[in-house]
Amino acid sequence: MTTDSSEKRRLMQTRRITCEGFQRDDGLFEIESVLIDFKPYAVVVGDRGRIEAGEPFHQMRLRLVIDTELNIREAAAATLHAPYAGCTDINTAYAGLAGLNLGPGFMKHVRDRFGGKAGCTHLTELLGPAVTTAMQTVWHVRDQLSLPKALRRQPLEDVNERPPEVDRCHALRIDGDTVRKHYPGFHAGALVRSSVDP
């Protein structure tokens, strides 16, 4: 299968997700995420009635304020366009993200708090790309602050101290060539050797 379609087709739906990460003067970070859905034809739906071609069908905004440890300090959601008037009622619930950490288990907490009728499907979906944007925004700053370059080349007994990107995807797996080349101190072979060396 190729990534290009040879079939005749007609565009029916476009979803655009934009996420931006900002470093603030107070040392915190803001992640701004926006989801916009639109169609190339007019539809009549819900409380809005007629939604013209190219007009946002959904438009949601999510803002997270996080620290270098990926703790959410503040969260706010806004629904600018939706098909039903009641869609905006749930926005304030997303302030409840404050206090959570974006690390392992975060999406389980999100599902527990905002699953089904306790949340907005689209705002909750927006958290996935918001989290990866947060990681990309904070990790390099955090590495510069807390993990000197020389330390990356030294085996550590406590693997919790390794850079957070290591072993989080296929390319950066702990036993792979990329980690051996760029983070040799955290490669599986180095960790094994350091634990048996006298």
Image (tube, rainbow, N blue to C red):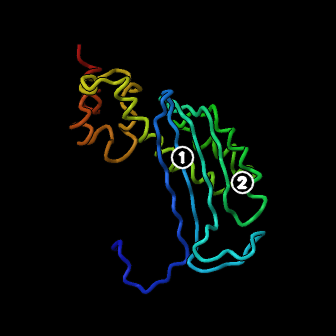
In the rendered image, residue 197, in percent from the top left (x then y), is placed at 23, 17
SS state under label 2: helix
In the rendered image, residue 124, in percent from the top left (x then y), is placed at 62, 51
Between 70 and 45, the residue placed more toward the observer is 45
Quarter of the image where the N terminus is located: bottom left
- Measured in 3D between alpha carbons, the distance from the residue under mark 1 to the one under mark 2, in whole angstroms, is 24 Å
The amino acid type of the residue labelled 2 equals: Gly
Location of mark 2 (residue): 116
Location of mark 1 (residue): 32
Indicate left or right for 128 with 115 as reference.
left
State which tag comes first along the sequence, 1 or 2.
1
Answer few, some or many: residues within 10 Å of disc 1's Cα (few below 14, many 20 plus, some between 14 and 19): many
- Point out the frontmost of discs 1 and 2: 1
In the rendered image, residue 44, in percent from the top left (x then y), is placed at 72, 78
Say which residue appears at 39% left-offset and 25% top-offset: 161
The amino acid type of the residue labelled 1 equals: Glu
Compared to residue 16, the image places residue 126 above or below, namely: above
Compared to residue 41, the image places residue 135 above or below, namely: above
Quadrant in the rendering for residue 167? top left
Compared to residue 110, the image places residue 158 above or below, namely: above
Say which residue appears at 41% left-offset and 42% top-offset: 136
Indicate left or right for 123 with 44 as reference.
left
Q: Residue furthest front?
A: 25
Tags 1 and 2 touching, CB below 8 Å:
no
Q: Which mark is residue 160?
A: none
